[in-house]
């Protein structure tokens, strides 16, 4: 499947939401033994043909969670004290986590390049989390990510074909 456009992605994800939710509920109850292997395979295959720079919808529509280690690393990169970085770029959300003050991401340039790519937050490095071990444990996150990321959408569609439940 080719990547759905961002305009159609939200509609497609919404149309598939109930089907995907049922699939993930079953997956949690009866997890295939080879799920990590299959997910790694699907993830790698999808990202061989996906260029995130043509999309960057994740950076444009959502903000990552910043861990203490992320804040320390990025502040050091900017030659700032961690508290200065927090004051300038972050806020505390309803879950008491540090997140960006606003989206699109402050560090995304006009050509979809990340200006802090080498020191970016862990959440950005791991997005869309489709190659995470024990993938079945992040079903709710994945349901959200298929609305944001065309690659995640494609991976979930392939997953349902490869591992029918």
Image (cartoon, rainbow, N blue to C red):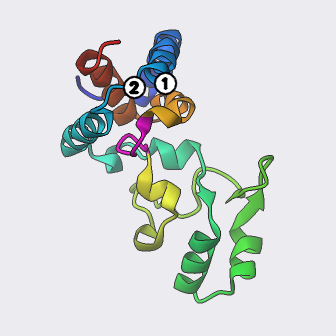
**Left or right of 78 in this view: 32:** left
Residue at point 53% right, 46% down? Answer: 60
Tell me if residue 73 is in the magenta stretch. Answer: no
Residue placed at 65% from the left, 71% from the top?
68
> Gap between marks 2 and 1, in whole Å?
6 Å
Image x and y of residue 42, in percent: 24, 35
Give the residue drawn at x 38%, y 33%. 152
Q: Is residue 145 visible?
A: no
Tell me: 4 left or right of 85.
left
Q: For residue 31, which numbered disc appears in the image? A: 2
> Magenta region, mostly helix, strand or loop?
loop
Q: Choose top left, top right, bottom left or bottom right for residue 62.
A: top right
Q: Residue at x 79, y 54 (%)?
A: 96
Q: Where does the image place residue 1, in percent across and percent down from the top left?
A: 23, 22
- 83 to 130, vertically: above or below: below
Return the mark for residue 28.
Answer: 1
Q: Is residue 129 magenta?
A: yes
Quick check: marks 2 and 1 in contact, CB under 8 Å?
Answer: yes
Query: Which residues fall within the magenta stretch?
Result: 128-135
Residue 128 position in % (x across, y down): 43, 43
Please determine whether, in this image, residue 73 is positioned above or below residue 81: above
Q: Viewer-proximal residue, 66 or 111?
A: 66
């Amino acid at each position: 499947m080719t990547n759905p456009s961002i305009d159609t992605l939200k509609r497609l994800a919404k149309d598939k939401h109930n089907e995907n939710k049922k699939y993930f509920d079953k997956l949690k109850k009866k997890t295939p033994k080879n799920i990590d292997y299959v997910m790694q395979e699907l993830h790698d295959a999808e990202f061989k043909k996906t260029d995130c720079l043509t999309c960057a919808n994740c950076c444009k529509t959502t903000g990552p969670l910043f861990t203490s280690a992320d804040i320390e690393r990025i502040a050091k990169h900017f030659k700032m004290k961690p508290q200065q970085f927090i004051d300038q770029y972050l806020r505390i959300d309803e879950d008491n986590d540090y997140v960006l003050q606003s989206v699109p991401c402050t560090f995304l340039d006009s050509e979809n390049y990340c200006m802090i790519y080498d020191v970016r937050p862990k959440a950005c490095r791991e997005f869309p989390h489709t190659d995470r071990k024990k993938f079945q444990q992040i079903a709710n996150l994945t349901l959200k990510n298929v609305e944001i990321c065309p690659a995640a959408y494609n991976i979930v569609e392939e997953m349902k074909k490869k591992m029918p439940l």
